[in-house]
Amino acid sequence: MNTEERNFATDAIREQYARTEYREHSVPLYLTSSFVFDDAEQARAMFADEISGNIYSRYSNPNTSEFIAKMCLLEGTEDGVPTASGMAAMFSSMIALLKMGDHVLACRSVFGSTHQILNTIFPKFGISHTYADISEPETWESKIQPNTKMIFVETPSNPALDIIDLEWLGKLANKHKLILNVDNCFATPYLQNPAKYGAHIVTHSATKFIDGQGRVIGGVILGTKELIKEIRFFTRHTGPTMSPFNAWVLSKSLETLAVRMDRHCENAMKLATYLETNPDVARVKYPFLPSHPQHALAKKQMRLGGGLVTFEIKGGLDQGRKFLNSLKMISHTPNLGDTRTIAIHPASTTHSKLSDDERAQVGIMPGLIRIAVGLEDVKDIIKDIEQAIESSRN
Ligand SMILES: *Cc1c(COP(=O)(O)O)cnc(C)c1O
């Protein structure tokens, strides 16, 4: 079968590492730190990069190679590197391509630890940054400096669920010859492929929807052959690489990504639609709700609306906390993209270190609740949220 004619779900299942002499149907787990050379000439040629092959599992391993080959196929990128965590992917994809004196233009609403990299770690190495707001695309071009080397964004943003126009951003990056790096964790390759719009690097926390079952930590860096070569040099010699076991788990997870995302999105849409009818809810945000300010853009670049819904409870901080204490089934934990529905109150947890002004800038109102909608029956998800809102009133 010509693989070019295959569709997403088929690729996610049928892209497989070559079968061994044992004729196994499912890909085996290769727990080995190194690989044996046939002879001295092969060892020399492999170390000289004249021939490819596994040498040592910090460089590559059949399981990590299989996982990354599948991710490349699903994102439409030439090459990739798996990493020990999403943050190892964010950090390595930036530091490997930047040097002292370079500048990064990033969206203000980046993931908390990415914020720490840009604000606290990079300045030690002479790498500066400027934040721009997703809701004000007209301000981005004027923030590009002569030393700007990379644009780093997340869309949909966390937790505001604002959308950045990837087609516009791809053109802006190319016009100024900048590397466009998109953290595609919230959308997954099933919902959105930033490389199609000109992103040179696509990064993921595989811990979230890619694993989808809250078991392992992992990350992925995908991109052009040329850039990945530099990043691979960095990860090979500094070691933030993925374990074969985690790669094996994540590759299995990809086999169900399409069906899981279909259900996450269907449940999220139903929950968002319900929340708009609840009198205690001031505002609901979900990219595929017609009330989302960028609904048309979301529909243009995303297959479905994603698994996250946010809403603002009218009673602010106090009612938000009571709501979380009143949940009976839904988990209160900072993860997302799990089979289990998860609720978090960003103002008192993930974004508590920001000032009120900074929180408002990234769209976090005191009563904002973020729901990472899981795969339980949506009737039970809605029932739990409804009773918790009811109990949070007094
Ligand atoms: C979780 C997350 C990360 C970090 O990933 P880890 O696997 O936890 O290191 C980065 N970006 C986004 C958008 C995330 O949600």
Image (cartoon, rainbow, N blue to C red):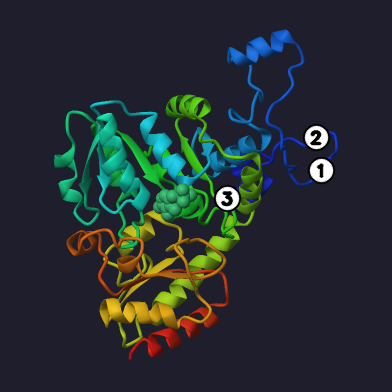
Name the one closer to the observer, 303 or 345. 345
Residue plotted at (29% across, 75% down):
367
Does the image show residue 223?
yes
User: Dot 3 corresponds to which residue?
Assistant: 8
Q: CA distance from mark 1 to mark 2?
A: 7 Å
67 on left or right of 183 = right
Q: Position of residue 218 (x, y in %)?
A: 53, 46
Mark 2 touches mark 3? (CB < 8 Å): no
The amino acid at mark 2 is Thr
Does the image show residue 289?
no
User: Dot 2 corresponds to which residue?
Assistant: 20
The tag earlier along the polypeptide, 2 or 3, is 3
User: Dot 1 corresponds to which residue?
Assistant: 24
385 on left or right of 73 = left
Please identify the quadrant where the C terminus is shown: bottom left
Q: CA distance from mark 2 to mark 3?
A: 25 Å
Q: Mark 1, mark 3: which one is toward the viewer?
A: 1
Q: Position of residue 114 (x, y in %)?
A: 35, 46
249 on left or right of 324 = right
Is the distance from the Cβ of mark 1 to the nearest ligand 1 atom less than 8 Å? no
Against 348, residue 12 (above or below) is above
Q: Mark 2, mark 3: which one is toward the viewer?
A: 2
| SS for callout 3 | helix
